[in-house]
Image (spheres, helix red, strand yellow):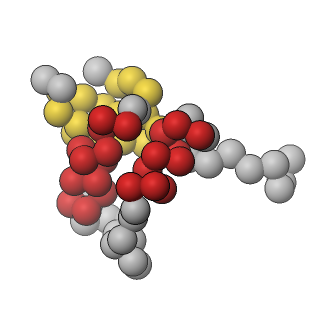
């Protein structure tokens, strides 16, 4: 199932983010506040779930700089 991410998904998002082999972060520190901002303020994150376990996610940030 794919749905919009909620704050209670943060531990699953973080687990997936730290497990990736491609697109690794140069600084692996992502704060809970950054997840919350993306989920609650920008509403730009979705999760892929199986049996209520986060298997993957997508997130983005819309900007108006190039519009």
Tell me if 65 is positioned left or right of 35 in this view. Answer: right
At x 18%, y 26%, the residue is: 52
Q: Position of residue 67 (x, y in %)?
A: 86, 47
Residue sitting nearer the eye, 48 or 22: 48
At x 32%, y 65%, the residue is: 22
Q: Position of residue 2 (x, y in %)?
A: 35, 24
Residue furthest front as drawn: 33
Q: Can you say whether 15 is above or below 29 in the image? A: above
At x 43%, y 50%, the residue is: 35
Q: Position of residue 20 (x, y in %)?
A: 26, 60
Q: Position of residue 55 (x, y in %)?
A: 22, 39
Where the N terminus falls, by quadrant? Answer: top left
Residue furthest left as drawn: 51
> Which image quadrant for residue 28?
bottom left
Residue sitting nearer the eye, 7 or 66: 7
Residue 26 seen from this side = yes
Q: Can you say whether 53 is above or below 1 in the image? A: below
Tell me if 30 is positioned left or right of 60 in this view. Answer: left
At x 39%, y 32%, the residue is: 6
């Amino acid at each position: 199932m794919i749905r919009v991410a909620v704050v209670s998904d943060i531990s699953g998002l973080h687990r997936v983010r730290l497990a990736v082999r491609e697109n690794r972060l140069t600084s692996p520190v992502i704060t809970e506040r950054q997840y919350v901002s993306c989920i609650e303020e920008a509403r730009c994150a979705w999760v892929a779930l199986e049996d209520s376990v986060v298997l993957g996610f997508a997130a983005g940030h819309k900007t108006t700089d190039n519009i």
